[in-house]
């Protein structure tokens, strides 16, 4: 039979001590994280440096997990924008399912870049206030990527408008009749 060893029932607690009453500590309004509460209880005696090192490690791990999940959700959202193209291709007889799967693969790859750009934009906005030396480069990558998309769109719309002539009854593609 295994159980808890209650011989040395020591715990380490972190919080606000007010007259022997331990409660969560809340950051004041002058801090950038106003309203954030902190309270922790650990089994055994843990030194202050070790406790804060473990809390920092746990917070960093959670931050990386949330960043990865946010990026994947952003990528997934952009890839869903192209689902109508996949469905339209699936409706083509004989080769439709193969064509739809190929479109799905291509649009998945294409949607990675805007998903990454949006994730960097959100992270950059937050980091500008916390650590400007990290946030400003993230925002710069976001703005450069967004500028590249806009440039590509403008370039393709101008090139496409100049090269295509009206195609109608009695005319050939390219404008010859």
Image (spheres, rainbow, N blue to C red):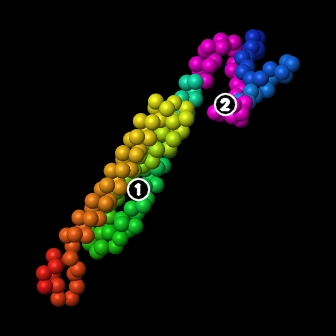
Q: CA distance from mark 2 to mark 1?
A: 39 Å
Q: Which mark is residue 79?
A: 1
Mark 1 residue element: helix
Of residues 38 and 174, which is closer to you in this image?
A: 174
Q: Quadrant of the N terminus?
A: top right
Q: Secondary structure at mark 2?
A: loop
Q: Is residue 1 left or right of residue 100?
A: right
Is 140 displayed left or right of 32 in the figure? left
Q: Is residue 86 magenta?
A: no
Among the 4 quarters of the image, the one containing residue 84: bottom left
Question: How far across and down, in percent of the image, does residue 29 sit?
Answer: 71, 33
Vertical position of residue 171 compared to residue 120: above or below: below
First reached walking from the N terminus: tag 2 or tag 1:
2
**Number of residues whose C-alpha sits closer than 10 Å to that of mark 1, classed few (under 14), some (14–19) or many (20 or more):** many
**How many labels, in total?**
2
| Circle 2 Cα neighbour tier, 10 Å, few/some/many (<14 / 14–19 / ≥20) | few
The image shows residue 18 at horizontal and vertical percentages of 83, 21
Instruction: Tell me if residue 10 comes above or below residue 116 in the rendering.
Output: above
Q: Picture quarter containing residue 154? A: bottom left
At horizontal 23% and vertical 80% (from top left) the residue drawn is: 166
> In which image quadrant can residue 39 be found?
top right
Residues under numbered marks 2 and 1 in contact, where contact means CB atoms less than 8 Å apart: no
Pointer 2: what residue? 31
Q: Which residues are magenta?
A: 28-55
């Amino acid at each position: 039979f295994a159980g808890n060893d209650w011989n040395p029932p020591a715990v380490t607690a972190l919080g606000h001590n007010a007259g022997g009453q331990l409660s969560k500590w809340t950051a004041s309004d002058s801090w950038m994280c106003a309203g954030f509460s902190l309270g922790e209880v650990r089994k055994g005696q843990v030194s202050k440096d070790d406790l804060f090192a473990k809390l920092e490690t746990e917070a960093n791990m959670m931050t990386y997990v949330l960043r990865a999940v946010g990026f994947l959700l952003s990528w997934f959202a952009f890839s869903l924008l192209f689902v109508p193209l996949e469905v339209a291709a699936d409706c083509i007889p004989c080769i439709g399912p193969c064509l739809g799967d190929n479109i799905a693969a291509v649009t998945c790859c294409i949607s990675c870049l805007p998903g990454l750009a949006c994730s960097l934009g959100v992270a950059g906005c937050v980091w500008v206030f916390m650590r400007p030396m990290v946030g400003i480069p993230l925002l710069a990558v976001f703005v450069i990527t967004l500028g590249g998309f806009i440039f590509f769109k403008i370039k393709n719309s101008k090139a496409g408008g100049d090269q295509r002539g009206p195609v109608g009854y009695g005319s050939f593609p390219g404008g010859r009749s």
